[in-house]
Image (spheres, rainbow, N blue to C red):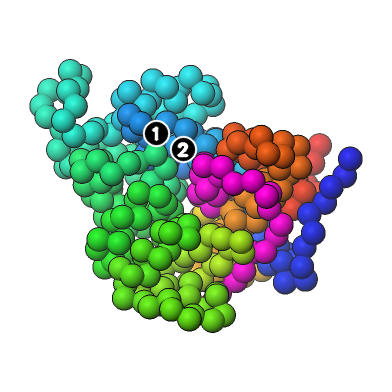
Amino acid sequence: MSDPPMLSSAAKDVLKKVRMVVPPLLDKFHKGKLYVGQLGRIAVIGGSKNYTGAPFFSANASARLGADLSYVICEPSAAQVIKTYSPNLMVSPLMRESNTPYPQDSSPPTPDSVAASITEMLPRLHVLVIGPGLGRDSLMQASVKKVISAAREQRVPIVLDADALLIVNNEPGFVRGWKEVVLTPNVVEFGRLAQAVGVDLTGTEPKEEACARVSRALGGVCIIQKGEVDYISDGKTTMSCDLAGGKKRSGGQGDTLTGSVGTFLCWRRAYLDGLWETEGALGEDELVMLAAWGGAAVTRECSRLAFRERGRALQASDVGDMVPRAFEGLIGEKEGSKL
């Protein structure tokens, strides 16, 4: 039975631009032959001894939305588990936790040695998602901090979520002014972030102004303030994503968001490279905002569809399973992409 999403006129206007960013599925692009990897190479960094679901949900969402190659970079014991979830993801056991023996290593791991094996991959990646299942282990945190620094130097866009946001809380200047990073805090995390940058949220009205104020305090970093309505701001422009979602919240739904935003950021790169005959003249900063809004819209539609089928029993895996249907219902394939 057809069950199209309900869209406001404002959402329809934003979706028109989001559709411009989505690459068509063609035999070849006008700049040359199509090959694996052009439409998205994304790595999710996270996954520790205690958390294996989050990085899978994120990488799986990125792949099911349309990224060509999705990697998970995680701790070795987590890698063994994550590999059993899906054969579609490439899982690299490069992360290390403190006070843990690793017989495969010739010397004790350090933040420098761990980060080095990951930064070598950066030239082959379009986007990093950092945080799902990362945990708060000191070695894990210090290692990803070095990776983030290298990504900024090499202009690799990143999405920061969950425990990776602690790095921003502890050192806001680390991402201040970076126009190719997206932060995805929930209600509690957003409050901590505001406190870290000295923004008093008491009595802030309208609600979307809070997101804008925190973004400005970070020099225009793109923030998705998750909630009943998702607010997305770079300090200058603020958009709301108010599509209906499901009424059941379960841990892990935010991981579908990070993977989805990551894929849209990959497509941003393809759009800027002019791989196909693109529409419009969307700028670099606007494309980051559209990637954030597109990821939020897909995730909310996934939640709505999953809740419609599962109700109270809804789990994070149900949300991820709806990514293809959500994309088709919201955005759909361009005419030249259809068989």
**Residue, x 66% and y 60% (percent of image)?**
18
Q: Which residues are magenta?
A: 236-263
Dot 2 amino acid type: Ala
**Residue, x 31% and y 76% (percent of image)?**
198
Outermost residue on the left side: it is 107
**Which is nearer the eye, 300 or 266?**
300
Q: Is residue 293 visible?
A: no
In the image, 104: left or right of 57?
left
Q: Secondary structure at mark 2?
A: helix
Are there few (<14), some (14-19), or many (20+) residues within 10 Å of tag 2? many
Are there few (<14), some (14-19), or many (20+) residues within 10 Å of tag 1? some
Residue where numbered disc 1 is placed: 51
Whether pointer 1 and pointer 2 mark residues with C-beta atoms closer than 8 Å, the reply is yes
Query: Residue 120: x and y, percent?
Result: 28, 40
**Residue, x 51% and y 23% (percent of image)?**
85
In the image, 144: left or right of 10?
left
Q: Secondary structure at mark 1?
A: loop
Residue where numbered disc 2 is placed: 54
